[in-house]
Image (tube, grey):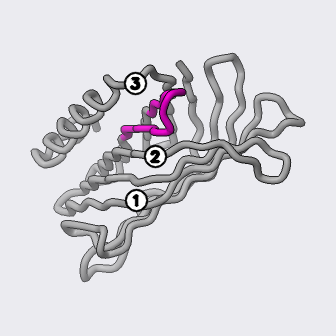
Amino acid sequence: MHSTMFRHPSLRSFSKATLLFFSASMSCFTLASELDFRLSNDAVNVNFASSSDSSPLSIGLGHFYRDEGDAINITNLDIHTVGQTAIGNLPTTVLLGMQAVYMSEDKFKGSATAIGGTVRSNLPDTPGLSLEGTVYYAPDILSYGDSDSYARARAQLNYRVIENADLIGGYRYLRTGIKDAGHRTFESGVYIGLRMNF
C-alpha cells in the first residue's frame, strides 16, 4: 500500500518544492497551528495549517491518499487570508484564498489552482461544538496537465474533547475533470478523525 506513495518523480519533486516553500514561509511567523487527520476505510487525508495573530495570512500543506487499485495521491498547498465575522449569532472564522493541487493516479497526472475557502462557526449553546464547510473549484483555465477542472468540498462537525484536541467527522467530495475523458471522482463519502491544536 505505502510503496506506491510518492513513487512518481513529478510527485516527489512537487512535494519537495511545497515543503521548502512552506518551511521558508513559516519561518517569518509566530505560529498557531492545527494538524488534521481524516480517515475512512480506504483513504487518509493529513492537513497542516499555521497562522499568526500578527498577520491575516494562513498557510497549509496537505496530502490525500487512497488505496483503490492504482493508488490516488493528491497534494495541496493552501494560502488564505483569515478573518472573523458572525453568521446570525454564531461566531465565525472565514478563510478565503487559493489551493494549489497536484493529482496522480496511474497514468493520470494533473494539477490545478483552485479558488475557495473554509467557514467555521461555533455553536454558543453547545460549548466545544462547531460546524465547518470547505469548497474549492478550478475551471479549465486554472487546471493543467491531464486535468480540465477540479472540485473539492467538505462538511465537518468538530467537538473539542480537551483544550488542544477535537474529534471530527463529516463528508468529503473530490473530483477532477479529465481532458477528453469525462470526470473522475476520487472520493465521495464519510470520514472520522482528529484535529490537534498547538
Q: Residue at x 48, y 33 (%)?
A: 55
For marks 3 and 1, the one nearer the N-term is 3
Residue labelled with disc 1: 186
Spot occupied by residue 121 in the image (x, y as percentages of width and height): 72, 44
Disc assigned to residue 118: none
3D distance between C-alphas at marks 3 and 2: 15 Å
Residue labelled with disc 3: 29
Residue labelled with disc 2: 80
Tell me: 128 left or right of 56: right
Range shown magenta = 49-62
Q: Nearer the viewer, mark 2 or mark 1?
A: 2
3D distance between C-alphas at marks 3 and 1: 34 Å
For marks 3 and 2, the one nearer the N-term is 3
Is 107 covered by the magenta stretch? no
Magenta stretch, main secondary structure class: strand
Number of labels in the image equals 3
Q: Quadrant of the N terminus?
A: top left
The relative height of residue 139 versus residue 41 in the rendered view (above or below) is: below
Q: Residue at x 51, y 24 (%)?
A: 32
Residue 41 visible in the current orientation = yes
Residue lying furthest front in this view? 54
Q: Amino acid at mark 1?
A: Phe
SS assignment at label 1:
strand
Spot occupied by residue 88 in the image (x, y as percentages of width and height): 83, 53
For marks 2 and 1, the one nearer the N-term is 2
Q: Amino acid at mark 3?
A: Phe
Tell me: 151 left or right of 76: right
Count neighbours of disc 2 (C-alpha within 10 A) and say few if under 14, some if 14 to 19, many if 20 or more: many
